[in-house]
Image (cartoon, rainbow, N blue to C red):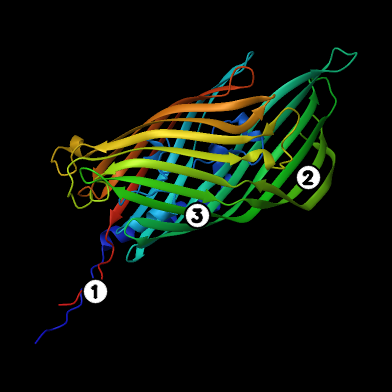
Amino acid sequence: MKTTNFYLRSSSRLFTPVLVVIFILFTYFSASFSVFAQTANNPFSRIGLGEISSQRSISNLGMGGVGVSLPTVKYSNLQNPALLSYHKLTVFEAAGIGEYKDLRTNTIQTNDFGGNLGYLSLIFPVYKNMAINIGFQPFSSVNYNAVSYELLQNTPTFVKYDYAGSGGVSQVFLSTGYKIIQNLSVGAQINYNFGAVSNTSTASLDDFRGGFIAQLSDRYNYGDFTYRLGVHYFIPVFDNSQINVGVSYDGAADFEATHFRAFERKNFSDIVIDGDTLFSEKKEAIQIPDAITFGISLQRGYLEAASGTQNTAYSFGIDYSMQDWSISNSSSIVGNNRLQNSYKVSVGGEITPNVRNSNYLARTTYRAGFSYSQTPLVVNNESIEDMSVSIGFSLPVKNNFSSLNMYGAIGQRGSLNTIKEQYVKFGLGISISDRWFVRSRFD
């Protein structure tokens, strides 16, 4: 006579510290939304919603941003929700991003350093060939501080203009992916975007003998939903490898905002003499255009790497994305500055020499990539281009299931005719992959 036994195992040693990490991080960022002010000075963030986040994981950034077609079982992939269907383990991932910038024009040079939260992601399987991802990441950030001078007509006096901005938009997301048939997966993601952006314009006489400072302050409070759809298909080829094809689509949206504007007149001791609130709850919207990304890649071993059934694992791919920002009606677009159609090409790959070798360096994953983009920005009638090269590593821990992830990139954006920005970006994150609970089993 058969007896029926039920087994349920909890990885409490993993579960407890993960919950502690999640609690600490969410508490910190909820208590201090000024996290965006920690980003490096970025004059280009004056236009529109600011600098749009890459929305890529550390592992994908190390490959130049390639990832829309690359499934994985040990890391988060934030680009295509369809790839969640390959996750059989629970994966918690957190990362921080930093950057150093050298900014130059024809007349001045400066540099700055800053850092920010990269993302939080928690993936867990809920059904056969289906998983869910919940997470938090920046959508955009604003941090700029610029000064210009203008000579008053028929006088020897200059007027000094100061422009400053801070804040940004955050994104909480919920996504799911499901494998319809063996080779085809689909996915969907819903995002809630929220945050505030502050801009100030100040005019003052530069002779410091008296007079007043006039300051115009604008604050935009954003809050709206967006969505993303994804598809993934693979074809088995030689040597237990596969060709992956992935597509993700971000739907267009009218970002709703509440606009506050105030005017103040102050003396040089920063004491307000008089002021007025021009409006406090003006309803506005900025159009976010739809975006589409295509990717194709050749991959071997990474879907089996956790079980060690392949020795050498590798992935090589190319992504192409495009988005038409010229439809945006942002009030920040002034003069010869505007938004345009943008596109990005990313090429990169990764390799793990031997996932079953006792040599630690052989089990380490190595990445490299290149990206080129025509950004949405047109400054002084010049299109702003961005190009960079990157490298990355994943250092295995806990029997190869979890890892410490790193990436670095060097690049250049703009030119001396506008602003030439040379930068070094880097990121550090951790991926914790494990089976938190084992399904009930019958004997």
Instruction: Out of 424 and 182, give the one closest to the viewer.
Output: 182
Instruction: Out of 159 and 328, give the one closest to the viewer.
Output: 328
Task: Compute the Cα span from label 2 to label 3.
Answer: 37 Å
Relative to 332, 248 lies left or right: left
Instruction: Out of 98 and 181, give the one closest to the viewer.
Output: 181
Q: Earlier in the sequence, mark 3 or mark 1?
A: 3
Can you identify the residue that label 2 sits on? Answer: 261
Task: Count neighbours of disc 1 (C-alpha within 10 A) and say few if under 14, some if 14 to 19, many if 20 or more.
Answer: few
In this rendering, the label closer to the viewer, 2 or 1: 1
Q: Earlier in the sequence, mark 2 or mark 1?
A: 2
Residue 217: x and y, percent?
Answer: 75, 40
Can you identify the residue that label 3 sits on? Answer: 229
Q: Is residue 290 visible?
A: yes
Q: Where's the N terminus, which quadrant? A: bottom left
Residue 282: x and y, percent?
Answer: 78, 52
Relative to 94, 100 lies left or right: right
Q: Is residue 79 visible?
A: no
Instruction: Out of 275 and 73, give the one closest to the viewer.
Output: 73
Q: Is residue 107 above or below residue 223?
A: above
Q: Is residue 443 above or below residue 236?
A: below
Task: Compute the Cα span from label 2 to label 1.
Answer: 59 Å
Q: Going 20% across and 77% down the picture, which residue do you hit?
A: 6
Q: Secondary structure at mark 3?
A: strand
Q: Earlier in the sequence, mark 2 or mark 3?
A: 3
The amino acid marked with disc number 3 is Leu
Q: Residue extending furthest left?
A: 1
Q: Where's the C terminus, which quadrant? A: bottom left
Can you identify the residue that label 1 sits on? Answer: 440
